[in-house]
Amino acid sequence: MEFKYDVIVIGAGHAGCEAAAAAANMGSKTCLITMDMNKVAQMSCNPAVGGIAKGQIVREIDALGGYMGLVTDKTAIQFRILNRSKGPAMWSPRAQCDRNKFIWTWREILENIPNLSIWQDTVKEIIVENGEITGLKTFWDVTFHAKCVVITAGTFLNGMMHVGKTQLAGGRMAEPPSLQLTESITKFGIRSGRMKTGTPVRIDGRSVNFQLMATQDGENDHHKFSFMNTSLRHLKQLQCWTCYTNEEVHRVLREGLNESPLYNGQIQSIGPRYCPSIETKIVTFPDKNQHQLFLEPEGETTQELYLNGFSSSLPMDIQIQALRKIPAFSNIEIYRPGYAIEYDYFDPTQLKHSLESKIIKNLFFAGQVNGTTGYEEAGGQGLIAGINAHINCHGGEPFTLARDEAYIGVLIDDLVTKGVDEPYRMFTSRAEYRILLRMDDADMRLTEKGWKLGLVKADRYELYRNKKDIVNEIINFTRTYSIKPSLINETLESYNTAPLKHGCKLIDLINRPQITIENIALHIPSFKRVLDEIKDSRKEEIIEAAEIQIKYEGYIARERMIAAKLSRLESIKIKGKFNYTDIQSLSTEARQKLIKIDPETIAQASRIPGVSPSDINVLLVLAGR
C-alpha cells in the first residue's frame, strides 16, 4: 500500500498537531501519523498550559493562527496570571486543563481541517534520495511519499522508563516506544543524543486529607489565552492545593537514593535543570528542610490528582513511604508511581532557523526531538515547522521569527545557534527584548504575519484590526486631551498622587502609577464616553493593551531602538562566504564553533558561545564592514 502527500507529520503531540494543522490550513495535502489516535496532544506530564514565558509562547501560537490557546481556553479548569507583582513584560498566563477533554477537543479540530488526514501507525524508516527526503515506511508496511516530512516524535524514540531498578521500554506509561526510526535518521549523518525527563506520582483524591492543605484558587477576570472573541470558563473551575515536604520525607528519600536510577548509574543522560526530581532537590539543596508541592486536578470530574514538585524515579514503595510522611497524605493511595524516561533527541545546531535539516533537504524537526521540554515550546516549534514545510512544497521564502519579534524566535535561535546539553526550557530571562515580547501584544506583533502567510483567517484578522484601531483611538485621545488643575486636583489627591501645578495632557496623568485608564475616566466625562463606545466583548483586554502601551512607551521605544541597531548585523549575510579554517586571526574556539554552526549572519555568529567580540570584528573587517 502506498500513499502520496505534500507534508507528512510524524507524531501527534503538541508539536505534531500544530505542524499538521498549519500545513493543512495553508493548503498542503497533509497526513498526521500517530501511534494512537486517542492520545493526540496528550499531556504526558502536568495537564497545564502556560507559565512563565511559556504562556507568552501560547499567545504567539494563537496570534499566528495556531490552536493551543483555543483548546486551552475551552478545556481550562483553573486560570491564573503569574508574576502579577511585576511589570506586564513578566505577566504570564497559566491554565490547568482537563486532560481528556484537551485531547478530544484537539482531535475534533484535526478531524475537521480540510486537506488533513490522520493515519494510525508507527514509522520505522525515512526514505532519502540524493540528500532529499522523499517519504517513509511504517511497521504496517505502508509506504508514504511526501515532498516534506516533519518529525515530532517527542519522548518515544527508543524511550525507556525507569521506576527504581525496574526498566520498561515505552514513550509514556502504558505506551510502546518508537524503534528503528532514530537509526534510520542518524545513518545520514544527523547527530543524536539521549535526554531524560520525569513525571510525578498520580494520586487518588479520595485518600487525601484536604483540610491539612492550603488552597490555591484560580482567577475569573477577562484574561484568557486566545485573542479570538471566545467565551470564558467553559468548564467548572476547580481549586488546587499546596503543602510541603518535611525532614521525615527527606530522610526516607535519602535512605533510598542508592536505589534511584539517577544516582546508581542506571541513568546516564541529563534531565531538566529547572524541573528537577524530588531526589535531585534533596541532594542539590541539602540544607533545605522542606520543598513546596502543588496538588492539581487532572480533570473536571476525575479523582486523579497530579503532585507537582514530586517527580521521581525512585522505587514505588519508597515514593509511597515518603509521601505518607506528609500529614495530608498519611493514608495516600496512588494510581501509578512517578517515573523517569530516557529518549533520543537530535542536535538542533544541524537545523536552519526554519527547522529544516541542514543535512537532509525538506526534513524538519520540532518539539522534544530538538532537545526542548514543555508542551508550549513544542507547539511553537511545530507551528514554524509546519509553515515552512508548506512553503517548501509550494514555493516562497522561509518563515522565521527574530528574537525581538517573538519568544518562539528566541527559542529557535537559541536551539540552532547554541545547541543543548540539557532539556531546554523557555524563561523570560532568555529574551533580551522581553519588554517587546509581552503577553498582551502578541497579536500586534504576529497576526499581520500570519495573515500574509494565509494561516490567519478573515475572522481573526478582522478582530485584530478592530482591536488595533480602538487601542490607537484611546491612545490618541489621551495625547490630545488637555487637563486643567482645577478640574482634576481633588481627584488626584484622592488617589494619593500629587496635584497639578499646570495643565497637562491626559497621557501624562495615566503614566502615573496610581492612575489607570478606568479610574481616571470616571472623572473625565468625554474620556468615559470614548470607552463606553467600545462595543467589542474584549473591552477589558483592549483597555489593558492601551494602558500598557501608554505606561511603558519610553521603555518600549528604547528597546525597539536597541533591537533596530542590532538588527543591522542580521542583514550582513556570511553563510558560505568564509573558509573559517583558514582565518588564523580568529580564535581556535571561534573557528571550531563557526565551522560547526555555519551561521547565516554576523548577528547569529555573535550569539554563538565561544565567539568573542574580537572574533566578530575580524568577520566584519573581512566582510568589508
Image: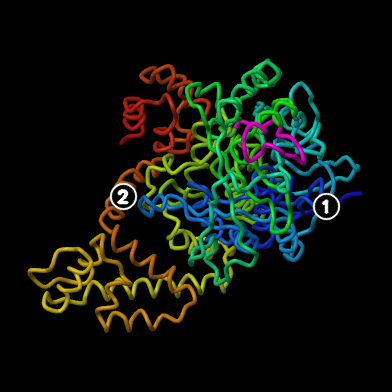
Residue 511, position as x, y percentages in the image: 24, 62
Q: Secondary structure at mark 2?
A: helix
Q: Which residues lie in the magenta part?
A: 324-347
Residue 614, position as x, y percentages in the image: 32, 25
Q: Is residue 462 visible?
A: yes
Residue 94, position as x, y percentages in the image: 54, 53
* Residue type pointed to by label 2: Glu
* Residue type pointed to by label 1: Trp
Left or right of residue 376, residue 336 in this image: right
Check residue 119 in the rendering and tell me which mark sits there, or answer none.
1
Residue 318, position as x, y percentages in the image: 71, 26
Check residue 109 in the rendering and tell me which mark sits there, or answer none.
none
Name the residue at 74% across, 54% down: 302
Name the residue at 57% across, 73% down: 458
Task: Please check the rendered image and state whether residue 334 is part of the magenta-colored stretch, yes or no.
Answer: yes
Name the residue at 44% across, 74% down: 539
Mark 1 vs mark 2: which is more N-terminal? Answer: 1
Above or below — where is 358 with respect to 4?
Answer: above
Viewer-proximal residue among 139 and 427: 427
Check residue 559 in the rendering and tell me which mark sits there, or answer none.
2
Name the residue at 67% across, 19% down: 256
Gap between marks 1 and 2, in whole Å? 46 Å
Q: Is residue 342 visible?
A: no
